[in-house]
Image (spheres, grey):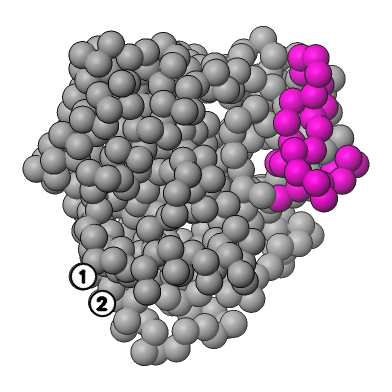
Amino acid sequence: MNSRDWFDRAQAVMPGGVNSPVRAFKAVGGVPPFIASASGAYLTTVEGDRLIDFISSWGAIVYGHADPDIVRVISAAAAKGTSFGAPSPGEVEIAELIVALVPSIEVVRLVNSGTEATMSAARLARGATGRDVIVKFEGCYHGHADAFLVQAGSGGATFGEPNSPGVPAGTVSTTRVVAFNDMAAVADALSPGDVAAIIVEPVAGNMGVIPPREGFLEHLRSLCDEHGTLLIFDEVMTGFRVARGGAQELYGITPDLTCLGKIVAGGVAAAAYGGRADLMRLISPDGRVYQAGTLAGNPLAVAAGLATLGRIQADDSLYDDLERRGAHLQGRLERALVEANIRGCVQRVGAMLTLFFGVDRVEDWSDASRLDSETFARYFRAALDGGVMLPPSAYEAMFLTASHTDEIIDQAADVLVAAIHRAAS
Ligand SMILES: *Cc1c(COP(=O)(O)O)cnc(C)c1O
């Protein structure tokens, strides 16, 4: 059976034929290749085609697919039982490792997804401050909990509007939406003194890669201090990716709470939130803010996470390699844009990178919303034809892993440069 056959079967029994919307290829057209297996930097489709992968499980993979060490610890863990519902030593070890690696985290709780981490951090912030309002940035993604499925209402720092049916107006009435990188708007949003927390992707990655403007994160920190508001860094994507200690280490800013996901569980389903001890001790059973999980601290996820984080801790070259290869790829794409005489820009922080067509610079959602998604779709198809799997949306980041060697990056760049030329014509 080929991908088309699988996709037909899938669509009969699953919404869009997928378990997460972007996988359905709506933004780029065509049939998504169904993946039979993956190894290192490569995916193998059910047709037997090998693709250089830049989805990297949306950033969850940092040492390449099916890394032998990580596969071994997962198998060993599975043989000892897949879930206990009672405490186990691995949970302690991974919590200690997270505390050691992430500068602001003193106490941590494991959960099952990034969505759970942000939802729980927001509850904790509200419980700790006795305030209801959360400030979020337009275009930042924090998972699919009701409170975050909000878009900016008309007018500046107003309350948001639901951006999905099923999200109660009452829920989003406590979410205030402002433009990313807009320091004045944040100050306005905090001025009433009713804000429990600001939640931010310290490097925005879910509207394409947008680095924080110089001073932006510092500004958030000082405004939070001034207004008794907590600062939540959603590092589900940036954690262990832009630096060993995440964006907070890279930019030297200390949030009160941090959400982790993706890399933290080495490609298995788990996530975490943590931060200042006095806040985290408010979580049940130490405190009264309720949050629980049947499969939280699952032994398979903990084993994969421990192996990944342990390796990151001991790895002196990982982030230098990712930076150098990311910069090289960026340079080749930028030159191709110039040669093809096509408007666009490449924005990157370490191993996360986006090529935006049709815009010269992207600093917030209003810039991102002006990008040229038709040219992107042509570029995407040409890349796929050439054997390179990009994230199937113009609003996403490409992710490099340690298994994207210099040679693989150059092969992929050859394909992407040609795809830029094809998209231009
Ligand atoms: C992926 C992501 C999430 C959601 O994580 P899930 O595990 O998909 O629920 C939240 N925040 C950010 C910044 C993410 O990139």
Magenta stretch: includes residue 152: yes
Identify which amino acid the numbered label 1 is placed on.
Pro
Measuring from the top left, give residue 402's x and y in whole percent: 21, 49
Tell me the quarter of the image containing the C terminus: top left
Measuring from the top left, give residue 280's x and y in whole percent: 64, 52
Q: Could you say which disc has been placed on residue 72 in the image?
A: 2
Q: Residue at x 33, y 27 (%)?
A: 423
Q: Could you say which disc has been placed on residue 68 in the image?
A: 1
Q: Could you say which disc has been placed on residue 290 in the image?
A: none
Q: Is residue 389 above or below residue 334?
A: below
Q: Main secondary structure of the magenta part?
A: loop
Q: Is residue 145 above or below residue 228?
A: below
Identify which amino acid the numbered label 2 is placed on.
Arg
Crowd band around label 2 with a 10 angstrom C-alpha radius: few (<14), some (14–19), many (20+)? some
Residue behind label 1 places its C-beta within 8 angstroms of ligand 1: no
Q: Residue at x 55, y 18 (%)?
A: 370
Magenta stretch: includes residue 423: no
Q: What is the CA distance from the residue labelled 1 to the residue labelled 2?
A: 6 Å
**Left/right of residue 401 with respect to residue 175 in the rendered view:** left
Label 2 element class: helix
Query: Which of the 4 image quadrants contains residue 350?
Result: top left
Measuring from the top left, give residue 43's x and y in whole percent: 28, 59
Crowd band around label 1 with a 10 angstrom C-alpha radius: few (<14), some (14–19), many (20+)? few
Query: Which of the 4 image quadrants contains residue 194?
Result: top right
